[in-house]
Amino acid sequence: MAAAGVPGDRKGILERLDSGEVVIGDGSFLITLEKRGYVKAGRWTPEAVVEHPNAVRQLHMEFLRAGSNVMQTFTFSASEDNMESKYFEHAEEAVWAVEVLKEAGKPVAATMCIGPEGDMHDVPPGECAVKLVKAGASIVGVNCRFGPSTSLRTMKLMKEGLQAAGLKAHLIVQSLGFHTPDCGKGGFLDLPEYPFALEPRVATRWDIQKYAREAYNLGIRYIGGCCGFEPYHIRAIAEELAPERGFLPPASEKHGSWGSGLDMHTKPWIRARARREHWENLLPASGRPFCPSLSKPDA
C-alpha cells in the first residue's frame, strides 16, 4: 500500500488513526476494469497490471484525485492458492495471515468478507474481530461481498465484540458500491445479477455520503469501498467528511456540494434541485416497472 494525502504529510497509517484522522481507502478495481474492457470476468485475475498498466495507473489516479489516502496494489487472485479459494471467508485463515504478516514488523490491517451472520464456519462477527486483534491486527473490519448498510451492521457487531472482550483496535470498512439487502451469507456472489447485471443496484453518491457519516459516527476511521465503488463514490466520502478532514479533494473542484452547481441551470425546476433536501430525501426510481426490487440468491 502507498499513502497519499496532504502534500508533505508522511505520517504512517497508525499515527494517522491514533490521532483520530480519517483515512479514506480506494474502491473497485476488478469490476470497474472489467467494465472498461481490461479484465475478464471469471477467475478475475489481474492480467491488466501487465497487459494494460496505464489503465490500472489511470484508475489509481482517479481514486487519488477523488480523495483516497491509500492505494492498494491490484493483486487480487494473483496467486495459485487464491485461484482455488477466494480468501478470508474464514476467521481461522485470516488469523493465520495476520500471524505471518506480523513477522514483517509492520502494522497489520485485516478485513474479512463476512456479513452479520459471521464467517462460513458460523463464527460471529464480534468473535472474528476478537480473534484478529488477539493475533496481532491493529486495524480490523470488513470488505466486499455486502452493501453499505449491511457492512455497517457487521461493523457494529465487530465493535461490540471487541468492547465486550476489553480489546481495542482501529476499525475499517470497505463495502460494495451496490445495495444488497437480499444477500445470503455468501454475499452478492450468490445474486443472479452477479456480475453482469448489477447496475440497477449501484449506490448513488448521496447513499455513500450517508454511509460515510454513519461509519464515522460508529467510530470507524478507515472508510473506503470495494467492488462497484467508483471514484465518484470515494469523492462522496471525502466531501461528507471534509469538515473533519479540513479539506476537499481535487475532484470536488468540478462538483457542487449537494447539487449546488444546478443553481445556474436555465430550467427553474432543475434549479430547484440545487439543495440538500432534494437529494437527501430522494427515493430514486429504477425505470424498470416490471423488475422486482429484490432477488432470491441462487445459493
Image (cartoon, rainbow, N blue to C red):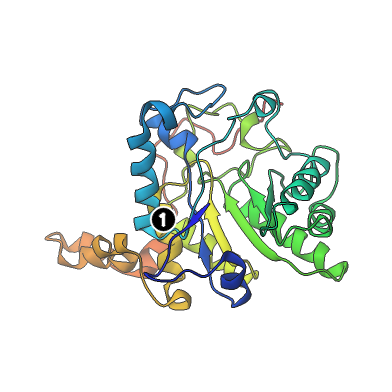
Q: Is residue 281 visible?
A: no
For this view, does 112 lie left or right of residue 38?
right
| Secondary element at image label 1 | helix
Instruction: List x then y, in percent, for residue 97.
Output: 75, 44
Name the image quarter holding residue 66: bottom left
Please state the total of marks drawn on the protein image: 1
Please name the residue shown 43% across and 53% down the image: 233
**On screen, residue 153 above or below 298:** below
In the image as oriented, which residue stretches furthest toward the left? 266
Instruction: List x then y, in percent, for residue 199.
Output: 44, 36
Instruction: List x then y, in percent, for residue 81.
Output: 69, 27
In the image as oriented, which residue stretches furthest toward the front? 104
On the rendered image, what quadrant is the C terminus found in? Answer: top right
Identify the residue position indicated by label 1 in the image: 205
Q: Is residue 139 visible?
A: yes
Label 1 crowd (10 A; few <14 / some 14-19 / many >=20): some
Instruction: List x then y, in percent, for residue 166.
Output: 86, 71
From the viewer's side, name the closer residue of 254 and 289.
254
